[in-house]
């Protein structure tokens, strides 16, 4: 079982594809190989591509938590379904000291 972030957009139709998110101006592609060694790929909405992209898998290889541009997706690997999504809205606020910024984050889930 493996899950990895792809650096290039895969060829459409080569493997089963699943899409998570509402719009796809920026995307993060992830490759999954489940416990039965079946490969599939998934495209995740990525509103803030330079924020954080990461993949975490549970010990039993049943679920993966994908962070795509700071938005979290809990994926059921076997059923290829979204279990939960955590998103946020960011607001940059200047503190007027040498152009530093504070980020205010609201979490929705």
Image (cartoon, rainbow, N blue to C red):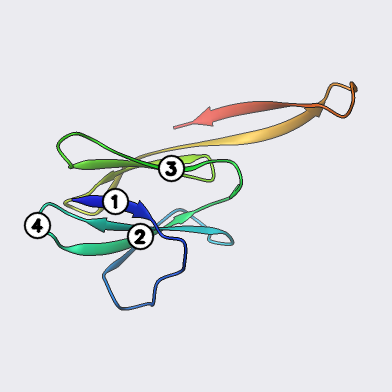
Q: Give the Cα separation between the discs numbered 4 and 1.
A: 13 Å
In the shown orientation, is residue 40 left or right of residue 25?
Answer: left
Q: Position of residue 28 (x, y in %)?
A: 47, 56
Q: Residue at x 90, y 23 (%)?
A: 96
Give yes or no for contact between labels 2 and 3 (Cβ–Cβ under 8 Å). no
Q: Is residue 57 above or below residue 99?
A: below
The label nearer to you, 1 versus 2, is 1
**Residue picked out by circle 4:** 36
Q: Earlier in the sequence, mark 1 or mark 3?
A: 1
Vertical placement of 49 versus 43: above or below? above
- Residue sticking out furthest to the left: 36
Decide: few, some or many residues near mark 1? Use Cα within 10 Å; few <14, some 14-19, many ≥20.
many
Q: Earlier in the sequence, mark 4 or mark 1?
A: 1
| Picture quadrant of residue 11 | bottom left
Q: Nearer the viewer, mark 2 or mark 3?
A: 3
Determine the CA span between mark 2 and mark 4: 17 Å
The residue tagged 2 is 42
Is label 4 in contact with label 1 (beta carbons under 8 Å)?
A: no
Image mark for residue 54? 3
Rounded to the nearest angstrom, the CA distance separating label 3 from label 4 is 23 Å
Mark 4 residue element: loop
Where is mark 1, residue-wise? Answer: 3
Q: Please tell me which residue is depicted at 26% across the width and 63% down the height of the picture.
A: 40
**Viewer-side residue, 23 vs 60:** 60
In percent of width and height, residue 29 lies at 42, 59
Pick whichever of labels 1 and 2 is earlier in the sequence: 1
Q: CA distance from mark 1 to mark 2?
A: 10 Å
Q: Position of residue 38 (x, y in %)?
A: 16, 63
């Amino acid at each position: 079982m493996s899950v990895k972030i792809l650096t290039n957009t895969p060829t459409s139709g080569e493997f089963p594809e699943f899409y998570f998110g509402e719009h796809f101006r920026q995307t993060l592609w992830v490759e999954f190989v489940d416990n039965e060694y079946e490969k599939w790929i998934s495209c995740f909405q990525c509103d803030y591509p330079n924020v954080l992209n990461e993949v975490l898998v549970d010990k039993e290889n049943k679920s993966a938590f994908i962070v795509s541009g700071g938005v979290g997706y809990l994926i059921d690997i076997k059923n290829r379904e979204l279990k939960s999504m955590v998103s946020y809205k960011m607001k940059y606020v200047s503190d007027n000291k040498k152009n530093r910024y504070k980020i205010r984050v609201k979490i929705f889930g």
